[in-house]
Image: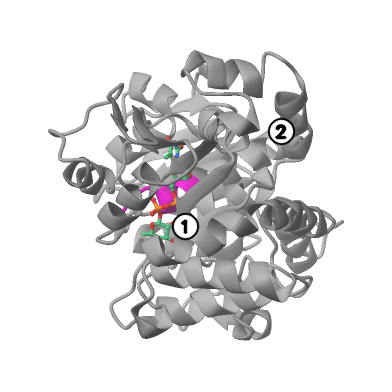
Amino acid sequence: MMDSVPAPRPAWEIFCQVVDNFGDIGVCWRLARDLARRGAAPVRLWVDDWAVLTRICPAAAGIEPAVGGVVDGVALRHWTPAFVPSAPGEIVIEAFACELPPAQLDAMAAQAVAPVWINLEYLSAEDWVAGCHGLASPHPRLPLVKHFFFPGFDANTGGLLREPDLLARRDRFLSQPQGRAAWRAARGLPTAAEDGLVVSLFAYEQPALAALLQAWAQGPRPIHVLVPVSRVLPDVAAALDAPALEVGARIRRGALSVQVLPFTDQDDYDAQLWACDLVFVRGEDSFVRAQWAARPFVWQIYPQSDTAHHDKLEAFLARYLAGLPPAPAAALGGFWRAWNGCAPAGLTPAAAWPAFADALPALGAHARAWCDSQAAMPDLARRLTEFCFHIKGGPG
Ligand code: TRH
């Protein structure tokens, strides 16, 4: 829902710069909406790339960036080099170490009570995160203190974004005929397990995809792959020897069918994850959503030039595989490492697939247990709110 620009001093002000892809804005938009819906409004979100914002939040396309507007209780503003601060938020979040404009810092320092200043970091399962979560860093010149807030998977970190009604919405979708069954029927997908596996494939470039699709095409069981428009699409087209694939395209090769879906808003993307049997996700936000979907999933981690992402992958695997019997644990570890190009002895996704496919029932039960254990802990917006009130010295 869109309406007019709200009152000047927001409770929360979030600054977000797009580094690459959608994830940075994806996380910030989700957080901003979550805070606003919990009654923490007004929330103001500054983004430097309006075009990326409109992909994640289609309602922003109806807003003149130079003017800004409100969607779902969040005041959206375009952060340009001509940035002029308005009254700064009581809590100011710089996402992923994007540097706040000097004029914003001056405006914050000029307040009678300095805003709480948070650097929201990337999600990582590594052990060092707990030691850095909450650390303070005084500004060298201004009377301001920045605090580091790290999302994470345990009680010593900032937790994961999870809207209060998310799991109830998911369960309604799964149980009601107008939910999962209707979603699948509308896309010509089977609703019975024996009619095949429905897979969502959201990924970066993937050189190993061709061999995997070929294995699926030649496999014993129908596999229906849904590909939302993303960087992997050219690899899908090349693997199927098809012309550039457009939204709506459908291709069959043996036991494999491939369907190209539009890039939707975040809520519809959740529905896609809930409707599928196996989901391939990437980066940060879709990776978390797959966990709340409680589906078997495959994570393609955002690649870093120094291969630091391999440590992040192993750190998550160490947590996620704990408690799984050896066979499904080895199957998942093998397939994930192959998908991320770091499997020993050159194991490929195609070679790792049969064991992974056999493990899917066990991985489904495990995904549910993991989701429940994570959902038993407070979510990120709540931990962030409590943390900020603690710094302010107010009620938590
Ligand atoms: O786009 P990403 O690759 O983002 C990454 C990560 O955030 C990473 O940490 C960061 O360093 C890097 O960018 C620069 O993947 P991610 O995080 O899953 O973000 C995708 C967003 O897109 C997520 O909010 C879900 C959303 N989405 C939709 O809203 N509709 C869709 O149809 C699809 C496929 C995704």
Give the position of the C terminus as an image quadrant. bottom right
Q: In this view, does 89 lie above or below 173?
A: below
Residue, x 44% and y 79% (percent of image)? 310
Marking on residue 126? none
Q: Which of marks 1 and 2 is nearer the N terminus?
A: 1
Q: Residue at (36%, 64%) from the top-left corner? A: 102
Disc 1/disc 2 C-alpha distance (Å): 42 Å
- Residue type at the position of mark 1: Ala
Q: Where is residue 345 in the image (x, y as percent from the top left)?
A: 37, 84
Please give the residue where the numbered disc 2 appears in the rendered image. Answer: 170
Q: Which SS type dominates the magenta stretch?
A: helix
How many numbered marks, from 0 up?
Answer: 2
Q: Which amino acid does label 2 sit on?
A: Arg
The quadrant where residue 128 appears: bottom right
Magenta stretch, residue numbers: 20-27
* Residue 165 visible (yes or no): yes
| Residue behind mark 1 | 107
Q: Front-most of 319 and 128? A: 319
Residue labelled 2 has its Cβ within 8 Å of some atom of ligand 1: no
Placement of the N terminus among the 4 image quadrants: top right
Question: Which of 193 and 145 lies nearest the eye of the viewer?
Answer: 193
In the displayed structure, would residue 243 be above or below residue 126? above
- Which of the 4 image quadrants contains residue 249? top left
Q: Is residue 7 visible?
A: no
The residue carrying pointer 2 sits among few (fewer than 14), some (14 to 19) or many (20 or more) residues within 10 Å by Cα, namely: many
